[in-house]
Amino acid sequence: MSEKHKALITVTDHEEVEARCTNCGRYIGPIVTCPFCGKRVKRHSRITLTKNLALTFAVVGLLVLHGTSMIWGTPAMNIEDLTETTNYAYVKISGIVTRSPTYYPGDNGAPGTIYFNVDDGTGELSVRAYPHPVVYNMLETGKVPAFGDRVNVTGNVYWYNAEQGFILNSLAQLEIYRPKAHNMTITEINALSAEDMTGYYRATTFGTVTSWRKFDFSVDVTIIDENQEEMSLYIPNSVFDMTGTGVLGTLTTGMGLEVTGCLEYYDAGSYSKWELIPATMDDIKLAQPELEVKDLETSPLVFPLNQQFTVNLTVVNNGQLPVQESTLNIYFDDVLEYTSSISALGAGESYDVLYDTIVTDDRASLLIRAEITVDEPLTDSDDSNNSISLQGGG
């Protein structure tokens, strides 16, 4: 037998010995304790060294991968770059919520599923959040994206039957940036040119309810300002379902409303108009005129009272809504002396009153008091259709 063959046989025999128990002779493979007799088998130092080095390299490699992932973070991608090959990829996208979220409530008031669309300028993607725990946490904290919000979302891309989507796995992976609203009158909003505006704008305005339309998927409320300029308050059902009905639990013509929301131009030919879409029902508040009597003076006034004098005062509307009709009462020693109607007092406007009178008695003092009350603070209501009950979750 050649020396080469002898060397091969020697190596084979050596490997066979290494794989057998030195006590019972049974095959035990690479383990160090015989499962048959329990004898600990001493291995060659090269095998031990190889196993230890492999474990060391594996641990070091995992630590390097972890450190690298912590440094680089989740990759941010454009929506146009998400293809079928990125199925189940864990990425971050940033963009604008292009419409109010769609909400499908669960059974018996349980949290449901939320869908909202994000546009990053390269494409649009539907983001889905499932009930537990994401939607539950959304409803509990009020951290729900709204139309016009800028968001950062981190999660998994999915493709199903050529449909692209995105799954939000945790509320911590959702960042919402809601722009500050600007105070504007309805007249100022209607003067905006839809063609010249780019982006999404939030505004706060005031108005009185004149009418509404209830659809299967939304409620459209028409409000007007003191110039009789009107606009629509558009409230999707998802806003009601997620945040309750708020002050619109019973909607009545003549209600004064302060509304904050994102502007959207509804392009429908001759019916085109601006709409204001609130993020939550907390963005809709009751608003009333705030009338105040100030600068009450008399001139001249000496005692005993047997003379003619003038009562001077100013009525101011400190609120954001106009007053159609109000009543001013002036009392002398709690006796009604003078009554006057004040009409069409706009928001922020004032009205001066001069009342000349004469008192012929021997009183040594006189208490003069003026009160102003609102008779018709808002628009005339239509008694045939002046209220509607709305329902919602929250």
Image: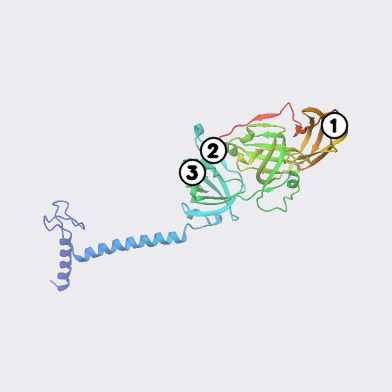
Amino acid, disc 2: Tyr
- Dots 1, 3 in contact, CB < 8 A: no
Labels 3, 2: front one: 3
Of callouts 3 and 2, which one flags the residue occurring earlier in the amino acid sequence? 2
Q: Nearer the viewer, residue 51 or 20?
A: 51
Residue projecting furthest to the left: 23
Q: Relative to 214, is 161 above or below?
A: below
Residue type at tag 3: Val
Mark 3: which secondary structure?
Answer: helix
Mark 3 and 2 residues: CB-CB less than 8 Å, in contact? no
Q: Residues within 10 Å of mark 3 (few under 14, many from 20)?
A: many
Where in the figure is residue 333, as x and y percent of width and height?
Answer: 78, 29
Going by the numbered disc 1, the residue's amino acid type is Leu
**In x, y percent, where is residue 255?**
70, 34
Question: What crowding class fits label 1: few (fewer than 14 Cα within 10 Å), some (14-19), or many (20 or more)?
Answer: some
Q: Which dot marks residue 134?
A: 3
Disc 2 is placed on an element classified as: strand
Residue shown at the point (76%, 45%) measured from the top left: 187
For residue 335, the mark is none
Q: Position of residue 384 (x, y in %)?
A: 73, 26
Mark positioned earlier in the residue sequence (2 or 1): 2
Question: Distance between the Cα atoms at labels 2 and 1?
Answer: 74 Å
Left or right: 1, with 65 as reference point: left
Foreground of the two, 352 or 370: 370
Which residue is tagged 2?
Answer: 104
Label 1 and label 3: CA atoms lie apart by 76 Å
Which of the labelled discs sits on residue 305, or is there none? 1
Q: Is residue 255 above or below residue 274?
A: above
Q: Quadrant of residue 51?
A: bottom left
At 28% from the left and 64% from the top, the residue drawn is 53
Residue drawn 81% across the image and 35% down it: 343
